[in-house]
Amino acid sequence: MNASTMLAERTATVRLTDLKKRYRVGDDWAEALKGVSLTAAAGEMVALTGPSGSGKSTLLNLAGLIDTPDAGTREIAGKPVDGLDDAGLTVLRRERVGFIFQGFNLVPVMNVADNVEYPLLLLGRPAAERRQKVAEILERTGLAAFANRLPDALSGGQRQRVAIARALVKSPSLVIADEPTANLDSHTAQQIVDLLRELSHERGAAVVVATHDERMSAHCDRVLRLADGELISGERQ
Amino acid sequence: MKWILFAWKNVMRNKRRSLTAMLITAMGTAAVLIGGGFALFTYESLEEMTARDSGHVVLAAARGFDNDEDVPLQHGLAGAAALAAHYAAQPGVRAVAPRIQFSGLISNGDKSTVFVGSGVDPAVDFRLRGPQLEFVAGEAPGASDAVPEVAIGNELAGLMKVKVGASLTLLATTTEGNLNAVDVIVRGIVKTGVPDIDRRLVMTDIRAVQRLLLSDKVGSLALYLKDTAQTEAMAAQVKAARPELAVRTWRDLAVFYQAVRALYNRIFGILGLIMVVIVAFAMSNTLGMAVVERTREIGTLRAIGTQPGEVVRNFVLEGAAIGAAGAALGMLLAGGATVALLFAGIDMPPPPGRSVGYPLLLSFSAPLYLGAMLVVVALAATAAWFVSRRAAHKPITEALSHV
């Protein structure tokens, strides 16, 4: 363990230890993760790379608390989460975790402002606070002029900006991003990477991002490579 | 408020499908309200008809309603005049009508047949019966001390081959068991709309009947109230004040009304049940498709912290919105039909046993409309809950990978 990894370990926002996960495939079991550990500190951006089927998505799902491991432990902001039931995990995701999906996954009937406001609505924040935070992050992501547009009326890059704004508006501890640049051209992808990096740094969120895109991983603090459900390397950029 | 707005936006996501569900709901609601309105109109008409016929509260001597008299007026009511005067002075009483039901033979000299007679106070009874008793010829008989006047059913008039002004003879058994006869003059020919009654009906002044039966008793006293809703209260008041009397309300005596009400309640109850099933299926189908189409979205909402119960609540709000919009449209349709029928002048064919039809009208009932709205909204919300609860509890990773 080198010095930077030790620092991340000490201030870890997310700590995943020896996670194992297997799935039933017909009559057999397929091991998706074979004891993977990962930590990410506030403001740190960690890339998960590897070929398809290497376990990136499974690790991302476990980190984002939308799936449960067969073995291993998870901590978010210093609190163990594996004893929590579904409702408890949902509350933790609501308060602490933001998601950015490859396909944007915006709610099509909500306009940009409503999509971004939704997490704050779940948190029960007062209307004035919601309005102020939404306006602030839309300004920050360059979407202020599009606040009343529906997602269908936006370009791919703009939609991903909305997804980033939605993930970060509540200032989460952890942001899970699944191939956030996969559907974007290189110029837009670069803008999205920069924006995600900037905002996560500003708001002190750890970002775990699964990507095949080397431009994305090149901007991350650490790149973890997975193959066959195992971590084969982890390097500081 | 935000959640309701989101629900409505989701309803409008697939306009054609939501509109179809709303229209089915509207048609179902309208069918129930029109059916219910027709049943209510029938009940109200029958109530009025029955109350006009029998009076709201009917008083008789202790065994006056037993129908087991050996001779006429064996269980008749004595001192009826004082009793009538007493109740006529009561607030809420519109009129008091003494009556004697009797029967015998009616003859034109050549031909005799059985009649069913009603001795009435002509000044009161013919006014109270209103449109229920249609004079096809002549007018209401008066209270004559000389030769009594009668009104007879039109079919009986045909049978006896008589017109207004003709002379007939009534033959009946007296209270002493002997036969007695009285000559009468036909003053009016009436039609009740029930051929069986029109074939036998004779109505005349009650004093003439008392002379024929050799009694000063009456069969019953009918109290006509200003407000039908006061029937039970007045009946209770009379029972308390006069425990020696037998008291019946129009409802107790309205066998036909009760039978029709029971039949219509069953028919329209089944119609309502069919509509409930149709609306439930339409709603389940619409929302079920929406849930399947939005499985990935449900996964996204769950991932960002929406509880399964909140996902279900959103669908329940959508269902309730579709149900409320459909029910409101159905109410408008039914209300429109109610108004249109007021001007359309459509008549229903005569019911079994009757010779005249009745107007096709619908009654408006605010409780019925409100009840229909609540039932439809509750039904739609329940359907939404039923179809969305499984998707809301689906594993998030599975929902997110749904295509």
Image (tube, coloured by chain):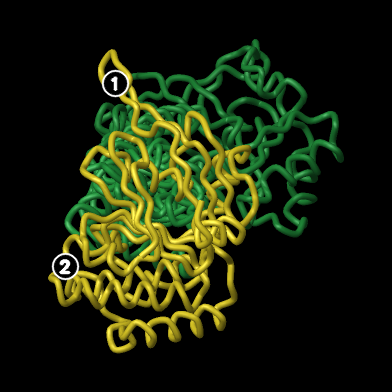
Residue that lies at the very extreme toward the front in this rendered image? A2
Identify the residue position indicated by label 1 in the image: B110
Rendered residue at 51%/75% (across/down) = A203
Location of the C terminus of chain B by quadrant is top left
Comparing A190 with B101, the one in front is: A190
Residue A184: which numbered mark, if any?
2
* B393 relative to B26 in the view: left or right: right
* Vertical side of A201 occupied by B13: above or below: above
Comparing B35 with B197, the one in front is: B35
- Of all chains, the one bearing label 2 is A
Comparing B154 with B37, the one in front is: B37
* A151 relative to B372 in the view: left or right: left
x, y percent for residue A23: 34, 26
Mark 2 to mark 1: distance in Å? 110 Å
Rendered residue at 41%/33% (across/down) = B269
Comparing A210 with B263, the one in front is: A210
In front: mark 2 or mark 1? 2
- Chain A palette colour: yellow
**Judging from the image, what secondary structure is the residue with disc 1 in?**
loop
> How busy is the neighbourhood of tag 1: few (under 14 within 10 Å), some, or many (20 plus)?
few
Rendered residue at 27%/22% (across/down) = A25
Q: Amino acid at mark 2?
A: Leu
